[in-house]
Amino acid sequence: MKRPSFTFERAALKRLPGAIVAGVDEAGRGPLAGPVVAGAVILDLKKTPKALRDGLDDSKKLPLDVREELYALLLSCGTAVIGVGRAEVHEIDSLNILNATYLAMQRAVEALGHVVTVALVDGNRAPKLACAVETIIGGDGKSLSIAAASIIAKVTRDRLMKEFALAHPGYGWETNVGYGTRAHYEGINKLGVTPLHRRSFAPVRAALAGEVITQSALFAPDAAE
């Protein structure tokens, strides 16, 4: 199985010598609750530790303990530049989830503190950034920079949701991190909708209208995260 590499980063540097290339990815488009979080990461092609080059991959493919180890290594290695951005629930509800995701990506790139030349973005739709954007379908499994960004975004968001679970027990956020699991639906039916629920999402709208909500094909969570 092919692993992420620096192929896309090297291609960008070949086109634009001296360019600063960042990988960008998000976590949390599908959940019923909580913010959407984006990560942006600049990796040094020559100085990235072997443990990162060998270990980085699409965050969804990695066990929790491996994600946590890679997250810690990204923060401690001294050669990765990391930015995190998020869009809050009220922004998701006012802008829609796609535009809120773009906003989180913009904030993540700005948080890098560097003038980025090229952003490699996971997916097939490009956010408006203050730099060139190259979209890569399945990029978190192809580009090391995007894979790193996916881990930063995923671990950051999961930790946030586990913190929120302490203030809002009964929804299972400590394990489902806001996705539409059975425990989450049961929590909404029993306890109601919290300020952290996305009112623009169909199951939450249904609950606010007084309906008893259950898992179904219509309300299925985005299992890809």
Image: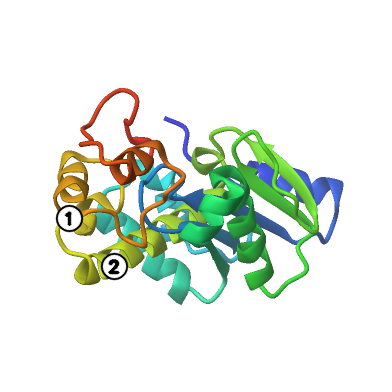
Q: In the rendered view, would you say 141 is above or below 102?
A: above
The kind of residue on which mark 1 rests is Leu
The residue carrying mark 1 is 191
Residue drawn at x 57%, y 45% is 96
Image location (x, y in percent) of residue 122: 58, 42
The quarter of the picture where residue 97 lies is top right
Q: Which residue is more in the foreground, 12 or 34?
A: 34
Q: Which residue is more in the foreground, 72 or 191?
A: 191
- The image quadrant where one finds the N terminus is top left
- The image quadrant where one finds the C terminus is top left
Image location (x, y in percent) of residue 88: 50, 62
Looking at the rendered structure, the secondary structure element under dot 2 is helix
Give the distance between the C-alpha atoms of the residues marked 1 and 2, in whole angstroms: 15 Å
Outermost residue to the front: 210
Give left or right: position of 140 versus 116. Answer: left
The residue carrying mark 2 is 164
Give left or right: position of 206 versus 18. Answer: left
In contact (CB < 8 Å): disc 1 and disc 2? no
Image location (x, y in percent) of residue 173: 23, 56
Q: Which residue is more in the foreground, 83 or 178?
A: 178
Give left or right: position of 20 versus 42. Answer: right
Confirm whether residue 43 shows in the render.
no
Residue drawn at x 73%, y 72% is 114
The kind of residue on which mark 2 rests is Phe
The quarter of the picture where residue 218 lies is top left
Looking at the rendered structure, the secondary structure element under dot 1 is helix
